[in-house]
Amino acid sequence: MLVVYIALMICTMTPVLALQAGADMSVLVWLVFGLVIVKAVLLVDHFMEMKHAPWGWRMAAQGWAVVVVSVLAGIHLAG
């Protein structure tokens, strides 16, 4: 469980560190989009304890992040 906490903290700190290092905003947007999906998988599997749930339920719980990120990425690309 400690590894998951550390991974979530790293996912949270990475965009901040990238911004402080001078990363371009478009890079940061895509970095955050990717990290949202990683964090969703970790949260669903470990904190919602769905690691051993039936495949359909697990994918439904994790799928919200993919849908949200896809919609936001589409809006970002269109704008």
Image (spheres, rainbow, N blue to C red):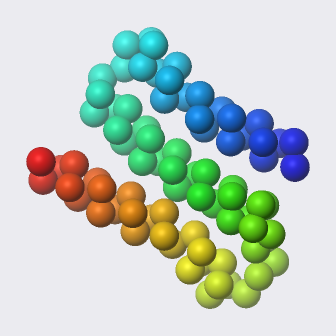
- Residue at the location (48% across, 70% down)? 64
Along the line of sight, the residue nearer the viewer: 34 or 13: 13
Where in the figure is residue 11, as x and y percent of width and height? 60, 38
- Residue at the location (47% across, 48% down)? 34
Please identify the residue farthest to the right as the structure is shown: 1
Numbered marks: total: 0
Where in the figure is residue 70, as x and y percent of width and height? 34, 62
Q: Is residue 67 left or right of 6 when viewed as pictured?
A: left
Please identify the residue farthest to the front as the structure is shown: 48
Q: Is residue 10 above or below residue 55?
A: above
Where in the figure is residue 51, as x and y percent of width and height? 78, 71
Q: Is residue 53 above or below residue 72?
A: below
- Residue at the location (61% across, 51% down)? 39
Q: Is residue 2 left or right of 45 when viewed as pictured?
A: right
Q: Is residue 59 left or right of 50 when viewed as pictured?
A: left
- Residue at the location (77% across, 61% down)? 47
Please identify the residue farthest to the top as the structure is shown: 21
Q: Is residue 17 left or right of 5 when viewed as pictured?
A: left
